[in-house]
Image (cartoon, rainbow, N blue to C red):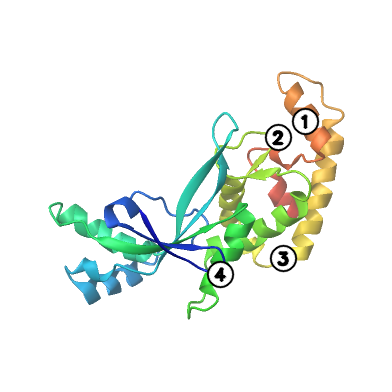
Amino acid sequence: MEILHTYHDGSKLYKMSIQSLLQVPIWKGNRIIDMNHVTAIQHSVQKNVMLLDSGYKTVQFLEYDTNQYPIKRTYVIDGQHRLSVVGSHFEQYPDSPDFYVTVTQMKAASESDVIDYFNTINNVKPIQFQEDPTIIANTYVHAMMGRFNQYIQVFRSGATKRPYMSVDKVRDALRKRVDRLKDIPVDTFIARCVDVNQQLLDELLHVVLDKDAKMIQKMIQLEFALAFDTTYKWLDDVLA
C-alpha cells in the first residue's frame, strides 16, 4: 500500500492491489447493494475489470474487540458495486492477474463521523436514498450517538458488550422497523428514546441484583439503560 497524496481534508490517496482491497470488508452502514447496478457495471466492462481501478474510498476508525479493547478497523465506504463485479470476476477466472487501484482513505473518530463522511460523499451523487432502509437507519443512529455519546461513548462499534450499545446491532434493529421509523421525525424519536431510557433506569433501580449486578450498576452510573434489552423491544415503545 503506497501513499500517493494527502488531501486538505486529511484523507490520503493510496495505491494498492485489488486483491488486497477485496479483503477489506464493506462498512455495515452502506446502502443495500443494487444488483441491477452491479449487472450494468458487468456489462460495461465485460472481462476487462482492470477498468475498475479508481474511485474507491475506505474509512478507518476504532472499534472494540471481544475484550473491549479499542482496535483500528478499515472498511470500504464507497465502491462496493465495483468490488462485487471484480470479486465475481476473480471467482470465475481465478488465474486473472492482480492489478493496482487507487483508494482514498479517511480516518474517523467514531461511527458518527463515518456517517457524516458517507453522507458527504453521496450528496454529490444522483442517487436517491429515501427508500434504502440502511440509509434511513443511519440518520437515527447518528442522532442517537449525538445525544447519548456526549460524555462517554455508550454507543460503540465492533464486538460491544453491555452496558454499551452496539452501533451495528441497533442499526439492524432499526432497519427491521424502518416502515414505522421513517414516519417519525428524528427529534421526536430522540425525545422518546430519552424518555424510555429514563424509564428503564428507574426500573433497574428496583431490580433484584443477580449475575448482572455489575452491569446494572454500570448502566445506572452511565445513566444509560437502552442496552439492557438485547431484543430491542424498547424500540417498539419508542415507535408506538
Which residue lies at the image location 34% right of the left edge and 48% below the top edge? 23
Give the residue type at disc 2: Pro
Q: Of the residues under marks 4 and 2, which one precedes in the sequence?
A: 4
Give the residue type at disc 3: Ile
- Left or right, 75 with reference to 217: left
Alpha-carbon distance for marks 1 and 4? Answer: 41 Å
Alpha-carbon distance for marks 2 and 3? Answer: 27 Å
Q: Which mark is residue 184?
A: 3
Q: Of the residues under marks 2 and 3, which one precedes in the sequence?
A: 2
Q: Of the residues under marks 4 and 3, which one precedes in the sequence?
A: 4
Give the residue type at disc 4: His
Among the 4 quarters of the image, the one containing residue 188: bottom right
Q: Which residue is mark 4?
A: 8
Give the residue type at disc 1: Lys
Residue 60 spot, x, y in % from top left: 51, 52
Q: Which mark is residue 218?
A: 1
Alpha-carbon distance for marks 3 and 1? Answer: 31 Å
Q: Which residue is mark 2?
A: 163
Crowding around mark 2 (Cα neighbors within 10 Å: few <14, some 14 to 19, many 20+) is many
Label 3, secondary structure: give it.
Answer: loop
Q: Of the residues under marks 1 and 2, which one precedes in the sequence?
A: 2
Q: Of the residues under marks 3 and 1, which one precedes in the sequence?
A: 3
Label 1, secondary structure: give it.
Answer: helix
Which residue lies at the image location 24% right of the left edge and 58% below the top edge? 88
Residue 33 spot, x, y in % from top left: 41, 63
- Left or right, 61 with reference to 200: left
Q: Quadrant of the C terminus?
A: bottom right
Q: Of the residues under marks 1 and 4, which one precedes in the sequence?
A: 4
C-beta proximity under 8 Å, tags 2 and 3: no
- The nearer-to-camera label among 2 and 3 is 2
C-beta proximity under 8 Å, tags 4 and 3: no
Residue 197 spot, x, y in % from top left: 80, 45
